[in-house]
Image (cartoon, helix red, strand yellow):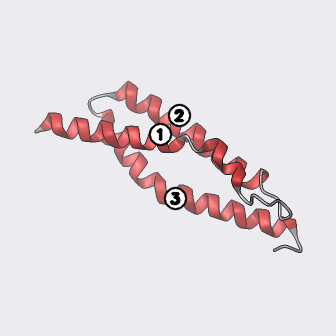
Amino acid sequence: MKATPAAYRFNCAQRAHVNLLENMAQAILCMLFSGLVHPRAATGLGGFWLACRVLYALGYVVGSGADEKGKGKGRMIGGGFWLAQFALIGLSVYVAMGLL
């Protein structure tokens, strides 16, 4: 991959996609569950999560070159998706506690 930057960027795109798939199931489930009681908050957090995931993927692919020392560090621009994801998990727990 060091010889061809295109192969390195393709590898980064694959990593960003797999990372999305790893996190998407729990984020969507939390959006659905918390949206039953707080639809606007779940929609806002879900939109923020999605925007940050797009920035994460773009930063990972575009911001990483094979000759760059900080390989893949461009993804940090979209790292705010963790805040939205943890907020969605917290909102889901809040809704679950309210149902008890």
**Which residue in the structure is indicated by mark 2?**
48
Q: Are marks 2 and 1 in contact (CB under 8 Å)?
A: yes
Q: Residue at x 16, y 33 (%)?
A: 98
Secondary structure beneath disc 1?
Answer: helix
The percent coordinates of residue 42 (x first, y second) are: 39, 32
**Which residue in the structure is indicated by mark 1?**
83
**Which residue in the structure is indicated by mark 3?**
21
Task: Please report whichever mark, 1 or 3, sits nearer to the chain's N-terminal start.
Answer: 3
Q: Residue at x 86, y 66 (%)?
A: 5
Secondary structure beneath disc 3?
Answer: helix
The percent coordinates of residue 32 (x first, y second) are: 34, 41
Q: Nearer the viewer, mark 1 or mark 3?
A: 1
Task: Please report whichever mark, 2 or 3, sits nearer to the chain's N-terminal start.
Answer: 3
Query: Which quadrant would residue 31 be assigned to in this image?
Result: top left
Task: Please report whichever mark, 2 or 1, sits nearer to the chain's N-terminal start.
Answer: 2
Give the CA distance from mark 2 to mark 3.
17 Å
Q: Residue at x 51, y 39 (%)?
A: 49
Q: Residue furthest left?
A: 100
Q: Nearer the viewer, mark 2 or mark 1?
A: 1
For the residue carrying disc 1, how many other residues have a C-alpha within 10 Å: few (<14), some (14-19), or many (20+)? some
Give the CA distance from mark 2 to mark 1.
9 Å
Task: Please state which amino acid type lies under the numbered disc 2.
Answer: Phe
Task: Please state which amino acid type lies under the numbered disc 3.
Answer: Leu
Query: Which quadrant would residue 36 be assigned to in this image?
Result: top left
The one nearer the camera, 20 or 68, is 68
For the residue carrying disc 2, how many other residues have a C-alpha within 10 Å: few (<14), some (14-19), or many (20+)? some
Q: Are marks 2 and 3 in contact (CB under 8 Å)?
A: no
For the residue carrying disc 3, how many other residues have a C-alpha within 10 Å: few (<14), some (14-19), or many (20+)? few
Q: Residue furthest top?
A: 40
